Image (tube, rainbow, N blue to C red):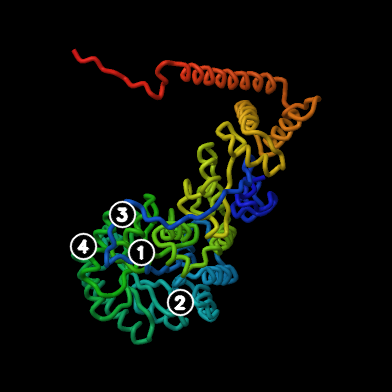
Amino acid sequence: MCPPVDGTPANGSNGHANANGENGAPGNHPGYSAIQSSHNPHPHHKSPYQPVGDFLSNVSRFKIIESTLREGEQFANAYFDLDAKIKIAKALDEFGVDYIELTSPAASEQSRRDCEAICKLGLKAKILTHVRCHLEDAKIAVETGVDGLDVVIGTSSYLREHSHGKDMTYIKNTALEVIEFVKSKGKEIRFSSEDSFRSDLVDLLSIYSAVDKIGVNRVGIADTVGCASPRQVYDLVRTLRGVVSCDIETHFHNDTGCAIANAYCALEAGATHIDTSVLGIGERNGITPLGGLMARMLVADRDYVLSKYNLKKLKEVEELVADYVEVNVPFNNYITGFCAFTHKAGIHAKAILNNPSTYEIINPADFGLTRYVHFASRLTGWNAIKSRADQLGLNMTDAQYKDCTAKVKALADVRKITLDDTDAIIRAYHHNLHNEKEVPLLEGLTAEEKKKYIAAEQELSSEKEKRQLEETADVQAEVPANKKTKTVTVS
């Protein structure tokens, strides 16, 4: 089993996917221990490399436009019927996202009905729909009851030539026409270029300036192919911030792995809104993941994030979406992955026991989750074995804990061991200390495993004896090793 560090019962749910990848199941993680840490302050210390505050930065006042029900529908494995969309929308609303973006009602008749149904739910989040920069699309959208429209059109030479075939003059004139219409209907309006980072900068600033003058709520920058780097994002957003007075929305694809970093840099440069999707699902490799962004922003401004978003709902909404799109939550997923708050190395376990902040920048409790210590391996340390023995109600001396740990490590050199194996070794070792009739440390070993185990234990014992001899020799030496220094002869 993989019980949590904070003392939750070993058979309780661990807040992670289990070893078989079944979301929401109790955690069956062989070799992990429920270890009680002395305290869990996770103080909000500023990094010594923290950048100087910038008046343009919106790291502490950003908003989320959650696009699982728009961008997420473009994920290869996604199919959301109305019931699924309603459940996802309600879960996102409970999490606290500022906006929920839906597929264009012009895409299909069912998309239009879905849009109307979600608008009638009375959610706290504003409902947006994403439409082409086309007057007929806008007319269909405003009739569904949405709070606003996200209008988009490609501006790079690639899309102008090979997608819609329009020049920049046509794009600007059409954008102004659609925006004026949407505003006349009392709806919130965002205008975004598509493939922004492969578009001509003069073209971009010209059209953004034009739409800003007639009063859009936001302009959008979209890294449609995921080609942008954080530095490029910062430069473009910072430049745009000097041109427009409206809010700036950003949309980052993750083809080259920069989506979260790009979103953070955009906020530092003055962007106000970030597009996300649950688990990052979307076209190709998807976009900025909601959970990953929360991890980054929690470290940047914990108080702001906790005041706005119900982080303990993250696992629930991720498992909901993962189930609908028939994928497992990745083992290394931000926050909710199998390994997100798992500690294995001996020096890590010791430090975590004393103060979790030593090897955790995020407190799992903020997300309703727990941490784990893997001690059934050759990397385990005696502090972890001591804590596990304490849980089992077995008291020994520090020397005995260390000796018991050596036996666990020896067996782990022979084969992969489980938590049950380690518990059996600890119990058997403790029994043999207090009873004349000894029992095997572990039942069921094959003859070959016994042979390897004896050899591994002898090797560990010889290393221990060698270290003890060296320590004794050092103490008895005229000049102890810790006082020795190298000398260099200069001719």
- Find numbered disc 1 in the image and state the secondary structure of the residue it sits on: loop
Disc 3 from disc 4: Cα separation: 17 Å
Q: Is residue 160 visible?
A: no
Query: Where is mark 1, residue-wise?
Result: 59
Name the residue: 39% across, 59% down. 300
Disc 2 from disc 4: Cα separation: 31 Å
Disc 4 from disc 1: Cα separation: 25 Å
Marks 4, 1: nearer the viewer: 1
Q: Give percent across and percent down for residue 352.
A: 53, 45
Q: Amino acid at mark 2?
A: Lys
Q: Give percent across and percent down for residue 20.
A: 63, 46
Q: Earlier in the sequence, mark 3 or mark 2?
A: 2
Disc 1 from disc 2: Cα separation: 21 Å
Q: Amino acid at mark 4?
A: Leu
Q: Earlier in the sequence, mark 3 or mark 4?
A: 4
- Image quarter of the N terminus: top right
Q: Answer yes or no: do the residues labelled 4 and 1 have beta carbons within 8 Å?
A: no
Query: Where is mark 2, residue-wise?
Result: 126
Q: Which mark is residue 230?
A: 3
Marks 1, 3: nearer the viewer: 1
Q: Earlier in the sequence, mark 2 or mark 4?
A: 2
* Above or below, 364 relative to 189: above
- Find numbered disc 3 in the image and state the secondary structure of the residue it sits on: helix
Q: Amino acid at mark 3?
A: Pro
Few, some or many C-alpha atoms within 10 Å of disc 1 (few <14, some 14-19, many ≥20)?
many
Query: Where is mark 4, residue-wise?
Result: 201
